[in-house]
Image: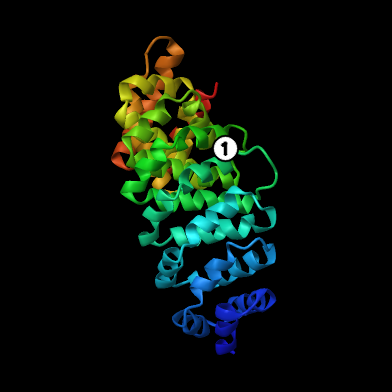
Amino acid sequence: MEEVVVEALRFGGGEGRIAAAREVAKFSSKQRQGVTEKGVISPLVLMLCEQDYEAIEAALFALLSLAFGSERNKIRIAKSGAIPEILKILECQIVPLLDLAAAALLILSSCTQNKLEIAASGAIQLLIHLLNLNCDIISMQAKLDFLSTLHNLSTCPQTVRQIARAGCVVSLLRLIYGLEKSSDLVEKIMGLLEEIVSSSDIALKEAAETGGTIPVLVEAMEEGSAQCKEHAVGILLVICQKYRDRYRGMILSEGVMPGLLQLSVDGTWRGKEKAKELLLLLRDCSNCGSRSKQSKNVLLEKVMRKIDRGERGGTSLKLVEEMIAKLRT
């Protein structure tokens, strides 16, 4: 069977090659490895250049199957010229093929050796453009895959600078404004933003200086999923660590304290640690003016002393709840 498939892909006509590509997608891991060694990747990549959507779809399924679980095949597929062809499919916004092309780019981007080539092919700018399109033709799954691809690329020091310079930070922040903060999409965006601003001073400065960043991060920290809250507080923390004197007052004025204290009690492990670090940075910013403020400051200091000592008992939790209630009045 494998010999017939290889022969059809290398030397066959249109329908025969489409049928052979579909067979590759059904092969076992051992069979896939066998046909790869016999040179099926190049003809499959050539099928991506055709005008026949059926041929492109069959080739994408086959290439996804070959790439799955094999770093060597991911490299081979990239070296055979698949990346520019996949980007063309995405750029043309061929609706039946968008999800498959997004998945193919994502799986290729998971290989370290492919990241620079993908970035150099213009993928970063294209993915940001597609994410910001105000239309319904791009599915939620494709958008999630675009974000995951950008996240994969952001783990490479050379590409994270390209992502920062491509205006990714502002584009992602704009995308968040109109979305439900508890959505999977916002969680992915927040994870990507945290990765970028933690790795690039350019991106961090851009995030801090973009109007509306602090409010949207505070909102995400209060209304997002557990992971989203963790990422949002992580971004606020790096902003405050780098530009404490400039932004701590703004962070406080957005009403961050109730959500921050809540997160320090019931967030993820990492979220709790980040929340406590941010609380410690913000604690000396309170102006002791009115009696109400003084009362809140005294209670906050009690809570912070317990956090400093690492206390997690019922009394500490009660104090946090009391502080949150007071801050919301």
271 to 7, vertically: above or below: above
Is the residue marked by circle 1 packed among few (<14), some (14-19), or many (20+) residues within 10 Å? some
The answer to whether residue 318 shows anywhere in this view is: no
The answer to whether residue 11 shows anywhere in this view is: yes
- Dividing the picture into quadrants, the one containing residue 235 is top left
**In the image, 317: left or right of 180?**
left
- Depth check: give the residue in front, 311 or 149: 149
- Dividing the picture into quadrants, the one containing residue 300 is top left
242 to 59, vertically: above or below: above
- Depth check: give the residue in front, 162 or 251: 162
Specify the amino acid type for callout 1.
Glu
- Dividing the picture into quadrants, the one containing residue 289 is top left
Q: How is the image coloured?
A: rainbow
Position of residue 112 measured from the top left corner of the image (x, y, whole percent): 36, 60
Residue at mark 1? 223
Q: Quadrant of the C terminus?
A: top right
Residue drawn at (31%, 31%) of the image: 241
- Depth check: give the residue in front, 211 or 79: 79
325 to 154, vertically: above or below: above
Residue drawn at (53%, 36%) of the image: 220
Residue drawn at (52%, 41%) of the image: 128
Position of residue 218 measured from the top left corner of the image (x, y, whole percent): 50, 31
